[in-house]
Image (cartoon, grey):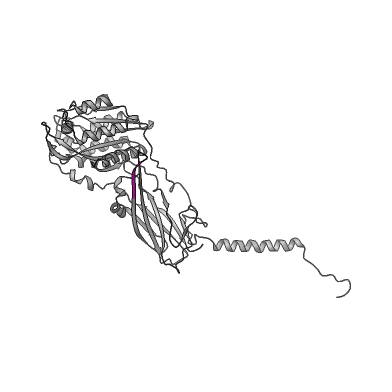
C-alpha cells in the first residue's frame, strides 16, 4: 500500500442508519405479512380488531322499574276467576305476582265499567276483596278505554311500568252500535299505542274458570298481563312475571312491540377448535386447513332481552342466520340453549344460545362470517288456541284477541330490526 494512502471508513452513524432502515423494512414486511384481515373487510382492521361504531354497540340494558302500577279489570267477564271464597289459579298467580313486586307497588287499581281508573286498593285489602268475591260484577269491558286510562296515568320518564290484569275480552255491551265498535277495535288500539310510542308486552296465562255455583267449567281459561312502559323496564318485568307463571305451570307465551333492542345481540365465545381467539376480538386466527379442514367457533348469544320464544331451540334455529362474505363454506353445527330464570332467589333471567359455527373450504387467507337474528316478532303460534272465538261466552278462547294483536303492530310501534354481527377468521397466526 503506497505511503500516504489511508483506507476510507464510513462513519459509524451511517452504518447505524443503514441498519435501522433495513430493520424498519423488515418490520414493515413482517407487519404486512401479519395482517389478519387480508381480505380488507371494512368491519375489521389489519390487527383483527372489530371497527366499533354506533351500529355495533349494544345499548339495551334490562332495568328494574322504579315503580309498578298494577291495574285489574273487574268486569262481568272476569267473574269466573273471582268467585267468592273459591280458589282459582288466577287468584294464586295474581297474588304471588303482586306480592313479589310489593316493594315496587303498594296497591292495585281497579278499572271501572267504562274503563276508567277506579279505586286504588292497598295490597292486603286487595287480597281480601279478591278472595271474597268483592270484584264480581255485571259491567262490560272497553279495552281501548282501559289502556288509554292507564297510559294517561303512567309516568314512563320516571321509570314507571303499568301491568293490566285482564281477560282482554272486548265487549262493548250497551254502547252505541257495539258491532261497529268491535270492527274498529284494531284501529282504536293502534291509535292509543301509537301515540304512547313506548313498549308493550302481552303475557298469556291460564286458570280454571268457575260458574256462579263454584263449579269448574273450564280447566284452562286464558287471561293476560299487559305490560306498558319503557322497553328496558318492560323486559325486566316480562321475564319476572313469565317466570312466576311458568313455575306454576300456567304460562302460555309473551309477545311484544315497541322494543328498541339495541343494534345487535350481545355475545361471547367459548373455546374454538383448529383456531384461537385473538384477545377479546370477534376474530379467530391460526386456522390450519392442512391439519383439519374445519375451524369450529363456539358462539354464545345472550337472549334474555328478547321474548321467551326465541330461547326455544327449534325457534332459535329458524331465526338464526349466517353466511360467509368471501367464498368459504359455513355450517351451523350443534345448538344448545341454556336458561336460568332464578339466580340467588331473585327473578333474573339468563338465556344463552351456544352455537357451533363450522367454517371450511376457505379459498383465501381470511374470511368473515356474518350472522344475525331475525326475531319472531309476529309469531302467535302459542296464542293460536285462544283465537277464533265467536262469542265472549267461549272461555276456552279469547273473544276479539286477534283484533287486539293486530292493533299492537298497526300503530307503528314496531320492534327494532337487529343488525348483523361479524366474525373474522384468518389462516395467519
Q: Is residue 14 left or right of residue 37?
A: right
Q: For residue 341, which quarter of the picture?
A: top left
Looking at the image, the residue that sits furthest to the front is: 344
Q: Residue at x 52, y 56 (%)?
A: 47
In the rendered structure, which segment of residues is drawn in magenta?
338-348
Looking at the image, the residue that sits furthest to the left is: 213
Residue 211 at x, y = what percent? Answer: 12, 33
Looking at the image, the residue that sits furthest to the bottom is: 1
Q: Is residue 117 left or right of residue 275?
A: left
Residue situated in front as seen by the camera: 128 or 275? 128
Residue 238 at x, y = what percent? Answer: 31, 39
Q: Is residue 216 left or right of residue 103?
A: left
Q: Is residue 116 visible?
A: no
Residue 255 at x, y = what percent? Answer: 27, 43
Residue situated in front as seen by the camera: 120 or 46? 120
Residue 298 at x, y = what percent? Answer: 40, 56
Q: Is residue 6 visible?
A: yes
Quarter occupied by the N terminus: bottom right
- Is 233 placed above or below 18 here? above
Counting every numbered tag in the picture gives: 0
- Is 310 placed above or below 408 here? below
Residue situated in front as seen by the camera: 240 or 416? 240
Q: Is residue 244 left or right of residue 29?
A: left
Q: Residue 373 colored magenta? A: no
Residue situated in front as seen by the camera: 219 or 261? 219
Looking at the magenta stretch, what is its main secondary structure? strand
Amino acid at each position: 500500500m503506497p505511503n500516504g494512502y489511508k483506507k476510507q471508513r464510513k462513519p459509524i452513524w451511517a452504518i447505524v442508519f443503514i441498519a435501522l432502515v433495513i430493520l424498519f423494512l423488515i418490520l414493515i414486511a413482517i407487519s404486512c405479512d401479519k395482517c389478519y384481515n387480508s381480505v380488507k373487510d371494512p368491519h375489521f382492521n389489519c390487527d383483527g380488531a372489530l371497527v366499533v361504531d354506533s351500529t355495533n354497540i349494544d345499548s339495551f340494558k334490562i332495568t328494574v322499574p322504579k315503580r309498578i302500577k298494577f291495574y285489574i279489570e273487574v268486569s262481568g267477564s272476569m267473574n269466573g276467576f273471582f268467585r267468592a271464597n273459591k280458589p282459582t289459579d288466577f287468584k294464586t298467580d295474581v297474588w304471588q305476582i303482586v306480592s313479589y313486586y310489593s316493594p315496587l307497588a303498594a296497591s292495585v287499581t281497579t278499572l271501572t265499567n267504562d274503563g276508567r281508573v277506579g279505586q286504588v286498593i292497598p295490597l292486603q285489602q286487595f287480597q281480601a276483596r279478591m278472595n271474597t268475591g268483592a270484584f264480581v260484577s255485571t259491567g262490560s269491558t272497553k279495552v281501548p278505554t282501559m289502556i288509554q286510562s292507564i297510559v294517561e296515568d303512567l309516568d314512563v320518564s320516571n321509570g314507571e311500568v303499568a301491568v293490566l290484569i285482564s281477560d282482554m275480552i272486548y265487549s262493548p255491551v250497551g254502547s252505541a252500535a257495539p258491532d261497529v265498535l268491535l270492527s274498529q277495535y284494531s284501529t282504536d288500539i293502534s291509535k292509543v299505542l301509537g301515540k304512547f310510542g313506548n313498549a308493550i308486552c302481552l303475557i298469556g296465562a291460564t286458570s280454571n274458570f268457575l260458574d256462579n255455583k263454584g263449579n269448574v267449567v273450564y280447566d284452562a281459561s286464558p287471561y293476560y298481563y299487559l305490560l306498558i312502559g319503557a322497553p328496558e323496564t318492560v323486559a325486566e318485568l316480562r321475564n319476572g312475571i313469565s317466570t312466576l307463571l311458568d313455575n306454576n305451570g300456567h304460562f302460555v307465551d309473551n309477545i311484544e312491540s315497541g322494543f328498541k333492542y339495541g343494534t345487535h345481540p350481545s355475545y361471547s365465545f367459548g373455546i374454538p377448535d383448529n383456531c384461537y381467539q385473538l384477545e377479546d376480538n370477534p376474530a379467530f386466527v391460526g386456522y390450519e386447513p392442512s391439519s383439519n379442514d374445519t375451524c369450529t367457533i363456539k358462539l354464545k348469544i345472550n337472549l334474555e332481552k328478547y321474548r321467551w320464544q326465541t330461547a326455544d331451540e327449534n325457534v332459535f334455529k329458524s331465526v338464526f342466520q349466517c353466511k360467509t362474505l368471501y367464498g368459504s363454506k359455513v355450517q351451523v353445527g350443534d345448538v344448545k340453549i341454556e336458561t336460568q330464570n332464578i339466580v340467588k332467589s331473585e327473578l333474573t333471567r339468563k338465556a344463552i344460545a351456544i352455537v357451533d359455527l363450522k367454517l371450511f373450504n376457505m379459498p383465501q387467507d381470511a374470511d368473515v362470517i356474518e350472522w344475525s337474528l331475525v326475531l319472531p316478532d309476529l309469531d302467535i303460534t302459542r296464542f293460536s288456541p285462544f283465537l277464533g272465538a265467536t262469542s265472549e261466552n267461549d272461555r276456552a278462547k279469547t273473544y276479539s284477541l286477534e283484533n287486539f294483536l293486530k292493533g299492537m303492530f298497526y300503530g307503528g310501534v314496531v320492534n327494532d330490526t337487529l343488525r348483523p354481527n361479524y366474525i373474522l377468521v384468518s389462516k395467519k397466526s
